[in-house]
Amino acid sequence: MKKTAVSSTVIIGAGILGVSTGLELARRGVRVTIVNDGPAANGASGRSLSWLNSSRMRSAPYHRLRMAGVDRYRTLAARLPDVDWLRFDGGLTWDEDGPDNAIEDVYQYEVSIGYDARLLPPDAVAAVTPGIDTGAIAKQGAIFNPGEGWVDLPILIGVLLEEFAALGGELVKDQGAAKVLVENGRAIGAVTTSGKRFEADAVVLATGPAVPAMAAEAGQTIDDGTPVALLIQTKPLEHPLRAVLNTPRVALRPAPGGTISLDADWAADEGVTVREDGTYEIAPAVVDALLAEASSVMAGNPKLEVASIGAGGKPIPGDGEPVIGAMKAVPGCYAAFSHSGATIGLVAGELLSYEIATGREHPMLATFRPDRFSEE
């Protein structure tokens, strides 16, 4: 095994970005400790819709990164073809009816960049993908993207942690919250609220919506656009839905065990209140309305019942683009912070571990570095 630029790394955060990076470093022979405040996937990764895609419009570097992310999941799916927590059954999206025919513009853009897309009139959808109430689709039609899919992040993180442990990696989850330990202007590890110190050659900050504040405490500016998010998991039901649906009032997908995962920005805005102690109050009326919206786009309009509700910050950088790479204001410290943590989770860990282990910057991360906010 080649000599690495560092021999040890501490990662704060056991969501998909932290665990993926930790595993990739362990594969390279680096000694890795992941420190998390509680069990793995107890933050944003545990309440993510986890839609694997690069649909709609975004910067070219971000599109390339997302497509590389989907590619890594396809490799994993080929190795594990029978699992029920990683599926590629396509994605279907439509907008509200309007005068500008925006869905046509999106379709033309996706075709122009070679993204697999089919614009379907409502009455053609059922023949392409099952389980949708086509009467809910706007008259402009819907875009079906056959190459899209979804993943259950908590299950995936558990699978990755098994290999991580087999390679000698350590997950610490009983020492409280951690912060970056900085001495003489350099990150030298992490320290928890219990006073436990974990020293290392490099530190990775992968705490989801907490990254900007924690980075600022260490000395690095990262613009923050994090809103509150709401994810509902339903009780199991028999239903033919296979694709991920992204509709004007609700986004939903199948989930393991015959359940459905669903969310909507409006529901979080209207129905989630942050209490003074930092916990969340969720309005039952909004939950009921969101369940009704989900039922209205599913064939047969089934009765949906809540199994669990998750609320918390949805990690979104201020400019919408991922933040991955070295925090130049804090030598020895790296950040991983992105709204698309599910889609880019595997490849981001791979590329960030490359930078940490080799000491060289990866060209695919050139536009995503944390120091871009300090240069404004």
Image (cartoon, rainbow, N blue to C red):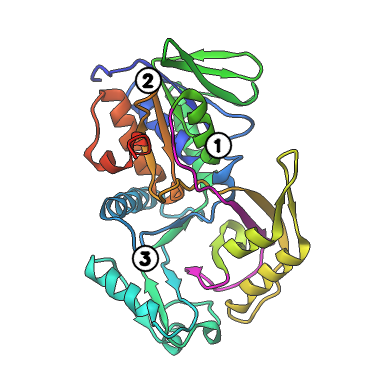
In the picture, which quadrant includes the C terminus? top left
In terms of secondary structure, where does tag 3 sit? loop
Is 206 above or below relative to 169? below
Q: Which residue is mark 2?
A: 332
Please say whether residue 244 is one of the residues in the magenta stretch.
yes
How crowded pointer 1 is (Cα within 10 Å; few <14, some 14-19, many 20+) is rated as some
Name the kind of residue labelled 1 in the image.
Ala
Report if residue 87 is visible in the image: no
In terms of secondary structure, where does tag 1 sit? helix
Is 199 above or below relative to 274? above
The structure residue drawn at horizontal position 50% and vertical position 82%, both measured from the top left corner, is 137
Frontmost residue, 285 versus 127: 285
Q: Which residues are magenta?
A: 220-249
Quarter of the rendering containing residue 121: bottom left
Quarter of the rendering containing residue 251: bottom right
Name the kind of residue labelled 3 in the image.
Arg
Identify the mark nearer the N-term, 1 or 2: 1
Is 51 above or below relative to 316? below
How crowded pointer 2 is (Cα within 10 Å; few <14, some 14-19, many 20+) is rated as many
Q: Position of residue 365 (x, y in %)?
A: 28, 40
Looking at this view, name the residue that lies furthest to the top.
184
Identify the mark nearer the N-term, 3 or 2: 3
Is 92 above or below relative to 127? above
Residue 273 located left or right of residue 142: right
Looking at this view, name the residue that lies furthest to the right.
284
In the picture, which quadrant includes the N terminus? top left
Q: Which residue is mark 1?
A: 210
Q: Which residue is mark 3?
A: 56
Quarter of the rendering containing residue 271: bottom right
Q: Position of residue 153 (x, y in %)?
A: 52, 47
